[in-house]
Amino acid sequence: MLPTISAPVPSEPEQQPETQDVLSVTEQEILANIQELQGQLRRMREEQEARQGLIDTQQEEAPKPADMRASRDEVTGEWVFAMSSGGLVTALQGAREEMNFVWIGWLEVSNVPEAEQDLVRTRLMEEYSCVPLFLDEDLVDKYYNGFSNDVLWPLFHYVPLPMYKAGGEKKFDSSLWDAYKTANIKFADVVSSVYKIYRILPVRKPLLEGMLSADLVGFHTYDYARHFLSACSRVLEVECSPRGVDYNNHFMSLGVFPIGIDPDHVSKALKTPWTRIRELRETFVGRKILLGVDRLDYIKGMPHKLLGLELFFTRYPDRTEVPEYKALANQINELVGRINGTYGTLEYSPVHYINQHISQEELFAIYNVADVCMVTSVRDGMNLVSHEYVAAQHQDVFANESSDLQPKDGPGVLILSEFAGSAQSLSGAIRVNPWNTDQLAGAIKQALTLSRVERELRQHKLYRYVSMHTACFWAKSFMQEFREVCDKRKKGIDKLPTLPIKEVRHAYAEAKRRLIISDYDGTLTQLQSLPQLAGPPPFVTSLLENLCRDPKNTLFIISGRERRFMDRWFGNLRVGLAAEYGFYYRLPNQDQWQCAGQGLDLTWKNVVHPIMQYFTERTPGTYIENKESSLTWHYRDADPHFGLWQAKDMQINMEDSLSNMPLEILQGNRMVEVRHQAANKSFVADRVLKAMSEPAARAEHGEVDFVLCVGDDRSDEDMFTMVQRLRDQARASPPSMATGERGDHERDNPPRCMARNANVYTVHIGQDQSQADYKLDSLVSLRQLLRKLDSDAQQGQGAPGSRAPPFHRMSTTST
């Protein structure tokens, strides 16, 4: 006999952050369909709940924050509060015994008078450690039912979207998005007072940006984490790694934290006198029980479960007997009726379909007596039903008591959908594809015929995981990772202090001879994929022109761009230039470019270009940039994942072909570059400082006593290191070397490139780790600093002159 017991529970969605985006017509149409269908489903649920009195049972669900219920006592008129038994609340019961935390959320009432709100806040904090949020009915309906439940919930579970029907008048209701933002702002305000598939969503970008502002984001499964990274990569076009996402100079760490339950709570509940294990065993004595506990939701796979059961009865007719059913949805009603009509008798029905709330004790009792538990979700977050079933099956409650009941014939068997998040962890279950009805029927047959030894082995594996990876373990793991992320972030920030602006301004004003070396792209201007769009804004050009007029200043700009672009942008300024990362350089007041790799063999391009061309032809959206000293393969416009895959494959191929050549293969921002080792920014910094320290220049203008070196990416790290090395050499040099006098020590020590007491500042733009001594948050901060330096100099000495310090031609010996 095979009674199947199914308990539906309502759905609730998760929160997401806020902001805004522009809606296209197609996106509006898609969202309108989602809202309409989900609204219909929600109304059906509400109607059914009103008739049947359904309330939450202990299932994994998308919870409302805090999930606190409030009502007035009919006699006293006082407020009465109760914490819901929703999945998240129940899962954290064990964690609350070992950790202190505060619930923040809205009450399920909207009529708390303002005069009573302070009293309600005080009571909830004292009795439940809960900070309430008071939201009006309209906002709750739009934010929670409208946007969260009807839009986000299906998207998070990969529910296929309906086709938009021509002629439909409904459009995406932007008021739902506005309500969602308003509610999130209210939540954020409460948090601050106490202590924050996407691609088809019109507001996908601000949702992702809101999540990326966090220090740590955790997911229940690796699949969800992987899909989140994919959404960030495609929607925001950022580089992602398994560790997290670097976005707007902030690194968001990513973690996978499968939630669990409290097995001790289940064990204690099974031993209470009102847990009806005895009665259920007596009712179904001599029969096998297949259990399904599901919310009436399109992701739970209830039709799939019943279709599999129907096919099982067809193939194995000797298994057809047992109790009654009730129907809720038409499809479920039809399937249940069909099974019971075909395989039932006048006395028994194969399927019991329970459409009403059952208590926690009742649910655990059913878990305990069931021989098989079927979880057939077509898509689910974790589904803690599987964990609860395993915990309830761990012991025979009457095994050690004198009882007329026969001991259980070993533990039951878990049949688990491969699309449930828990399938990645519960290896002792029989995993099935709920869309494969043949496989599902076979799994039922297998579960009912497994030997006791095999069932015990499977249960041992399952319970070992469930008992170790509890809700408390989940909470502790997340908090430990969170603390480590925050500590690393704090140490990283402390290790790279912010540039002391006042100190720099004072040192600049007091200096006699200054050198400013700056990277171009990402430092003076925003990054641009096309050289034609990368020219400096007029105010940047004007600022550089003012700095160049000061005779105390030598300004050098280093870029990966070609010489022709550097000439076009800065040819009229008295500024030193380095193109292609320093492979070519030009001193201030000179017209001719010099080559760091004079006479070098560039025939290596004949080897590299065909390899890049091969991958370009097979990767849509890519192109090759052929510079004089390098070849760059850009995949910014390609599919992010396929482009990165191809870039790695291409790099492996090139490393094999170029292993004996003096070349560097660099992975950059959506590009792969092959260049000669002589193309290095550190070379420029070294040559410029040595040229400024030559005897004639030093005798006339003195030593360099102020150096500001700024950059934003990995190519600038060697430049920082070179400037720091030259600074350290100068500080360690004997005092007499400053005058140009030669002594015995100069045979062993080269002339220093700057004053022994020179103020040297190497500065990284952004929050990344760097070899620089200091950091600035953004290029805007650098522009502000340069403006202040220019303004200070002009106020201190009047209009600067135009006489430039002499520069002597550098040696062009190749490196």
Image (cartoon, grey):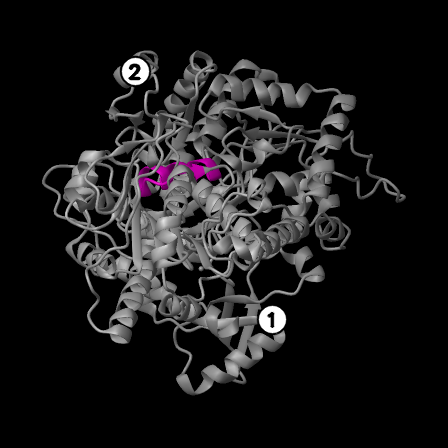
What amino acid is at disc 1?
Answer: Tyr
What x and y, as percent, mark residue 446?
A: 63, 19
Q: Nearer the viewer, residue 50 or 553?
A: 553
**Residue shown at 43%/12% (left/top)?**
657
Residue behind mark 2 = 609
Q: Is residue 796 above or below residue 266?
A: below
Which of the numbered marks, if any, corresponds to residue 128?
1
Q: Quadrant of the N terminus?
A: top right
What x and y, as percent, mark residue 26?
A: 17, 40
**What range is drawn magenta here?**
224-240
Q: Residues within 10 Å of mark 2 (few under 14, many from 20)?
A: some
Q: Main secondary structure of the magenta part?
A: helix
2 vs 1, front mark: 2
What x and y, as percent, mark residue 724?
A: 50, 49
Q: Nearer the viewer, residue 734 or 211?
A: 734
Q: Is residue 106 magenta?
A: no
Q: Is residue 385 above or below residue 677?
A: below
